[in-house]
Amino acid sequence: MLPRIRRPTNYRRRPPRLAGFPLISLITSLVLLALFLTQAAAQSVTTLTDPSTITFTLDPAGSATYFLPSSASTNPPIYISLSLCSIPSSLSSNTSFLLPPVLDTLLYVSSTPDIQPYPSNASTPDDIFNRGESLATSKLEYGYGNVTLEVDEGERGIYVAVFAPDLSKVLEADASVNGQWVFELDVSSGTADPPYVARSRAGLRTEDTDMSSVLLSTAKWTGDQPAYQAIVAPTNGLALALSRSKCFVRSMAGQSVASGANLNTSTTTRGWPAGGTRTQYFVDGLDRGANYTAWLLENGTMSDGGGAIQTRVWDPVFFATKSSDSCRLVYDIDVCPSVAYAVPAPASLDTPSLISFFNSSISASLTNFTRTMTTFPCGSDEMGRYSVVSTCQDCINAYRDYLCAMTMPRCTDAPSNATLNDTTLAAGDFLPSYAIPSQYDTSLIRTDPFASRTPLFGPSNLSATFPTLFNSTYRPTRSNLLAQSPFPYTETPPCLDICYLVEARCPPFLGWSCPKNSDGSPSGGTGSAAYGVTVDVPSAQRLGGDVKGSDLHKRAADRWGNVYCNALYSDLAMAAQFAPPSSAASLLNSIPRIALTFLVVAVSFMLCS
């Protein structure tokens, strides 16, 4: 229910009349009148119109007061929002200063003339309003605050006061603030929904980056394609603290590199749940080894059907481009539809040739596995299914993701402080080898062809793997390998969940087995060191398109740009198993026919007995 501001009823007892002292009373009245006129002159109140958007500045410890007459607001509810656009210059130039994401109450709204929010009447904002039922307030969270209210009939209007933030709690005692705060105040009414909405979750999913590009995707949507806009701008010191501010996001849109020839927008069915349509953005032309922030913006119609536009902004995601050219971002691969990340790639090999190489090596293995699965009567209810929740196609899809994750390593930069040593083979050929510090032992460092898990990246096979690069006279010397191979690179290992999904969705006769997860790391079984594990990620720190309502909080990545293992959406598939069904009907529809038959037989047996 919207807060309704009501005028307080004040009951005052008449003071006794004084019998004398008329001169003193006259002097007192004149002094009070002079003080009132001085105060009224200092208390400049700006009249607002409906709708209106104003930008204003405040000095440190300053404030401003506005009045919206009731005649200008005849269509409640009334939406009042405040955005912080920029901070004083002395703070923005201070590299050690971080603006808190949540600022104390800065926006005050009152409809009672007796307690108009005149800043000069009090030393602190809270002193101005002494009746909580006569005002509405809002903090600024990530640069944005808002109040939605209705006004009683007969009230003169609405008073709005804005105060500069009190930074005494975050600044040193002797620190001074020079410059001005810049705010934007919006007032509107007459619509079912507010004109601007800041979502408290990420709208984009960072698939991956290479040294000059990034791939972003949205959550699935139905019906007409939403009017989305991707904003990708270099990260600055206010990108988080003002990430929901209307004016700050607008300024970042003016700096966005996701436009023109640098932007390729398309749709995809990749993601979880499989088959949903999503919008994806491939943004090129980024700086090498640079930090970026990406917002998802949508200009959609309001729910009342009147055609009014509502702007929606989601919390941003943060990412960094890679520093080396050892990794290449690939996606929309037919044989591996879930792959959307950077893979090791020789610098001189074009992307279509790289994808063709992976396609040929994966297709053969997938064909053999599918042939094995056909020995089981997958589509026969009469013969009996091996599972009431999984099908043979589920098994093939799970194995496909496993095969792609193992064959196409997820590539990222090698540690910058690794040292190069010369090593030789028995034949005298030089190979680059890197000594990796122990703090990097959570990643798999692929320093030379012998360290690669992909055999075709081995030194003796490079000429056969990439015939367009090498001829019969090619020798894997140190200079050739450094110039033509993708080494060195760091591999983000596949998530253990990828193996678990094959184990859970495939028939027992395959004998599939995975390492166990012990104390947050894989243990036991062949190849346990080649897996990574998911970690707990709070809901506010997750990427866009996440599973809602799941009790499983393990994820493979977060919106700050951390990637803990290569999931191919297996972390979301696991989380979906711990999410409540949307309705009983949807749960019923998800149960295979044989399971329903079993339930019917069981119920009939119980009734008969």
Image (spheres, rainbow, N blue to C red):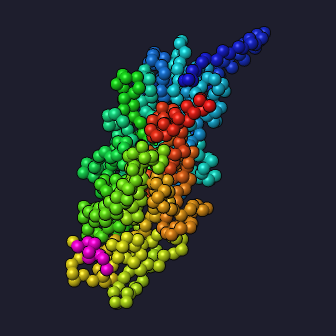
Q: Residue at x 47, y 79 (%)?
A: 435
Left or right of 533? Residue 168 is right
Q: Quadrant of the N terminus?
A: top right
Say whether residue 463 is magenta: yes
- State the residue lying farthest toward the front: 609
Q: Is residue 214 visible?
A: no
Across and down, in percent, residue 238 comes to: 47, 49
Q: Nearer the viewer, residue 174 or 546?
A: 546
Q: Quadrant of the C terminus?
A: top right
Question: Up-down: is 470 above or below 308?
Answer: below
Task: Specify start and end residues of the magenta stretch as a single range.
Answer: 460-467
Question: Up-down: is 256 above or below 320?
Answer: above
Q: How many marks?
A: 0
The image quarter containing residue 36 is: top right
Across and down, in percent, residue 384 comes to: 45, 46
Across and down, in percent, residue 545 comes to: 44, 44
